[in-house]
């Protein structure tokens, strides 16, 4: 294939598909069917059915190039689904050969749908084709495995048992398929199997060995916990001790969002060394709908990583409703390390809702790690404020690395909007190294190889950034 694949981007396709399917229950104007009169619904339904039938016939008759050049992203997705659903396995193989000629974003979307359909109709042929794709095959194979398991988990499990090394990269990428989390191929199969037959899935997971056994069993239990956390809790005892903790955490999080009182009582029945982590997870689940109560419950957690994790999740969920309250609560914790980490979750939501209030909060904080974190997150997540103002704020960050990253991001945005003013500022400021000034003068990015070599040395003056700033996240 001509281009490397970026596997996590497949999660975007899942999101687009999910948005499309969710939107199928509304009219084009956003009015739900229940808001229409019977006559309107009848007319709309017949017209919609005719249009859908026509679209299906048309899309199956067209080439993928025609589909991808048609307007409307969700319409393209539906047309691709219709197109691929009408092809034989042999025709799907022929279409797969054409994917490398597509732009990357369209290639990811089309391949997810194509290989998913192919795996549902002829999974062994689809899997064999991935062996001819070089490195790209490593990123496509999880889609084939997941689609195969969604239809026939037993056969997918049999294939996996003799070919597990083909899926080694899934574990390295920390995914159970597109957008998934943790465990690799065994977890992918276990998750899909559990949606069809939880008992059979759990029995199969129990036949595995090593870390795969624990992750697959946890995946089954996690699926069950979504609808019946009490039943899931009763299954944990059959797991090995090393895997019980993560399974209990998953149950606690889901149970906490459904009935915190029941989750809390169950957590207190766990072994003492598992209670803190599980309680933190239960509180994180509670914070989705009731951050105020979660903030009261979190006070009983011992200081440490479990508490810090719960603090960050709570702050994120609370900031969606009331970022000012979330930020004020963080300061009340008298734990700068926890507050600074959680501030990265709060500030983006606050900037989106009220950037002026977010900036006022930053400016009222004393110099230190909490203010540095708030200022950096404000800059990184801000697409509304003038870049020159963001640059000025970045220079007030006391931590060298954080200042360098924030300053680089803000300056590059300024260069995009007003290159003359931005370049003049870079040349006159002591906050940039000689190498960075030379790069900007040459029309290059601030990021790149340093003529002075790596290291954390600053530039001239008191506000020097490192010679080669770490790559900052895209704005």
Image (cartoon, helix red, strand yellow):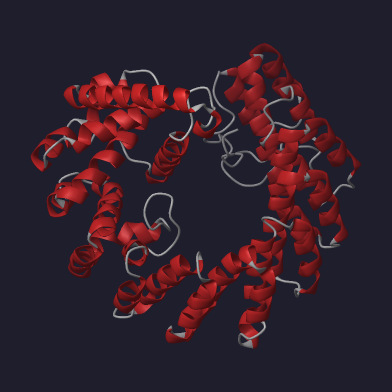
- Residue lying at the far left in this picture: please name it: 90
Q: What residue is shown at x 75% (from left), y 60% (from top)?
A: 338
Quadrant housing the C terminus: top right
Could you tell me residue 360's position as x and y percent?
A: 87, 36
For the point 33% across and 31% down, the residue is 78
131 to the left or right of 281:
left
Please give the name of the residue rendered at 37% of the width and 71% of the height, measured from the top-left corner.
Answer: 216
On the question of residue 2 being in view, the answer is no
Picture mark count: 0
Q: Nearer the viewer, residue 61 or 452?
A: 61
Residue 344 vertical position relative to residue 232 in the rendered view, above or below: above
Of the 4 image quadrants, the one containing the N terminus is: top left
Q: In the image shown, does 196 or 2 lie closer to the viewer? A: 196
Q: Is residue 363 above or below residue 219?
A: above
Q: Give the residue furthest to the top.
A: 420
Q: Can residue 318 be seen?
A: yes
Q: Is residue 416 left or right of residue 182?
A: right
- The answer to whether residue 355 is left or right of residue 6 is right
Residue pictured at 46% horizontal, 37% vertical: 19
Snapshot quadrant of residue 324: top right
**Along the viewing direction, whichever of 107 and 336 lies nearer the viewer:** 107
Image coordinates for residue 173, horizontal then vertical, percent: 40, 55
Q: Position of residue 334 (x, y in %)?
A: 86, 62
Residue 112 lies, in percent from the top left, at: 30, 41
Q: Is residue 430 above or below residue 211?
A: above
> In front: 188, or 251?
251
């Amino acid at each position: 294939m001509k281009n490397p694949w970026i596997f996590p981007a497949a999660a975007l396709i899942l999101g687009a598909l999910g948005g499309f399917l969710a939107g199928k229950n509304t009219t084009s104007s956003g009015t739900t069917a229940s808001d229409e009169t019977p006559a309107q619904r009848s007319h709309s339904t017949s017209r919609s059915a005719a249009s859908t039938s026509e679209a299906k016939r048309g899309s199956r008759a067209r080439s993928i190039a025609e589909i991808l050049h048609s307007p409307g992203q969700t319409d393209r997705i539906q047309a691709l689904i219709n197109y691929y659903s009408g092809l034989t396995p042999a025709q799907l193989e022929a279409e797969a050969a054409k994917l490398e000629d597509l732009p990357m974003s369209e290639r990811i979307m089309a391949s997810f749908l194509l290989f998913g359909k192919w795996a549902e109709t002829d999974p062994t042929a689809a899997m064999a084709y991935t062996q001819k794709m070089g490195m790209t095959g490593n990123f496509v194979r999880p889609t084939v495995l997941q689609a195969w398991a969604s239809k026939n988990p037993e056969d997918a499990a049999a294939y996996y048992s003799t070919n597990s090394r083909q899926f080694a990269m899934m574990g390295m990428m920390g995914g159970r398929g597109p957008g998934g989390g943790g465990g690799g191929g065994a977890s992918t199969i276990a998750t899909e199997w559990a949606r069809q037959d939880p008992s059979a899935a759990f029995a199969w997971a129990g036949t595995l060995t090593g870390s795969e056994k624990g992750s697959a069993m946890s995946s089954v239990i996690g699926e069950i916990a979504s609808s019946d956390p009490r039943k899931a809790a009763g299954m944990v005892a059959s797991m090995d001790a090393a895997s019980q903790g993560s399974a209990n955490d998953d149950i606690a999080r889901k149970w906490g969002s459904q009935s915190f009182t029941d989750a809390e009582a169950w957590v207190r029945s766990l072994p003492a060394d598992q209670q803190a982590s599980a309680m933190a997870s239960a509180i994180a689940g509670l914070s989705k709908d009731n951050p105020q109560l979660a903030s009261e419950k979190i006070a009983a957690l011992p200081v440490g990583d479990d508490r810090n994790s719960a603090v960050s999740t709570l702050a994120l969920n609370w900031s969606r409703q009331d970022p000012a309250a979330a930020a004020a609560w963080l300061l009340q914790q008298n734990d700068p390390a926890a507050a600074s980490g959680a501030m990265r979750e709060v500030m983006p939501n606050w900037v989106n809702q009220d950037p002026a209030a977010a900036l006022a909060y930053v400016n009222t904080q004393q110099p230190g790690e909490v203010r540095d974190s708030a200022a950096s997150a404000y800059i990184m997540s801000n697409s509304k404020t003038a870049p020159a103002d963001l640059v000025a704020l970045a220079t007030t960050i006391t931590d060298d690395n954080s200042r360098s990253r924030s300053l680089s991001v803000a300056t590059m945005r300024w260069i995009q909007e007003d290159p003359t003013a931005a370049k003049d500022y870079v040349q006159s400021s002591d906050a940039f190294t000689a190498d960075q000034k030379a790069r900007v003068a040459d029309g290059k990015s601030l990021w790149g190889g340093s003529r002075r070599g790596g290291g954390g040395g600053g530039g001239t003056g008191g506000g020097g950034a490192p010679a080669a700033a770490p790559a900052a996240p895209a704005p």
